[in-house]
Image: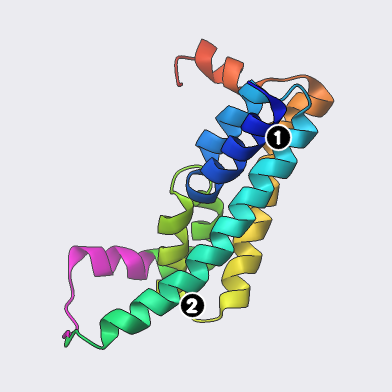
Amino acid sequence: MSFGTAALLSFLWSTVKYLIGVGVALAGFHDPLFGWIFTSAGAFLGVVLFTYSEYWLESYLKKFSKSKKRFTKTNRRLVWMRLHGGLPLIAMLTPLILSIPVGTLLCTTFIQEKHKIILWQSISIAFWGTLIFGSLLFFDVNLVQYLQRLNLV
């Protein structure tokens, strides 16, 4: 895979699903620093785009819906999540477990300040990117090969 193809694919995949972008970067780049740069930049762009587009989508859909408040199992889980972890918990889970659009959607249901959502999501992306690519760069520990040996990937 050429450098340009790996850069474009890891950037674009990271805007939607961070781990797929990381996998492309680990397979396509020889230098982990390039992988960290392209996946983080793609994820940052995805967070900004989905944060602003979900506020627009939510305001657009509110015009047409006349919803009553109901106490469903999903609403109770969201309340529990907000009380026990809130925005930092969702932000830390977003890159690995949730996808970027789903994580930002959950964050927009918790808080209305866009800059806080973007800040926490950016911190989370930088943390996970540094952990994954930094372990390869500084300690020569390839987490993907380690997880494959444990039959987790």
* In magenta segment, residue 97: no
Q: Secondary structure at mark 2?
A: loop
Above or below residue 24? Residue 49 is below
Residue depth check, mark 2 versus mark 1: number of the one nearer the observer: 1
Residue located beneath label 1 in the image: 35
What colouring method underlies this structural image?
Answer: rainbow
Q: Residues within 10 Å of mark 2 (few under 14, many from 20)?
A: few
Of the pair 64 and 72, the residue shown nearer to us: 64
As drawn, 40 above or below 115: above
Q: Amino acid at mark 2?
A: Ile
Choose the circle earlier in sequence order: 2 or 1: 1
Query: Residue at 71% of width from left, 28% of height from top?
Result: 3
Q: Give the residues in magenta.
A: 67-80
Extreme residue in the top direction: 149
- For the N terminus, give its image quadrant: top right
Q: Which residue is disc 2 drawn over?
A: 111
Report the disc number at residue 18: none
The residue under the point 55% across, 81% down is: 113
Of the pair 123 and 20, the residue shown nearer to us: 20
Q: Return the x and y of residue 72 as percentages of the image width and height.
A: 17, 69
**Residue 63 location, x and y as percent?**
26, 88
Q: Is residue 9 above or below residue 76?
A: above
Residue 141 shows up from this direction: yes
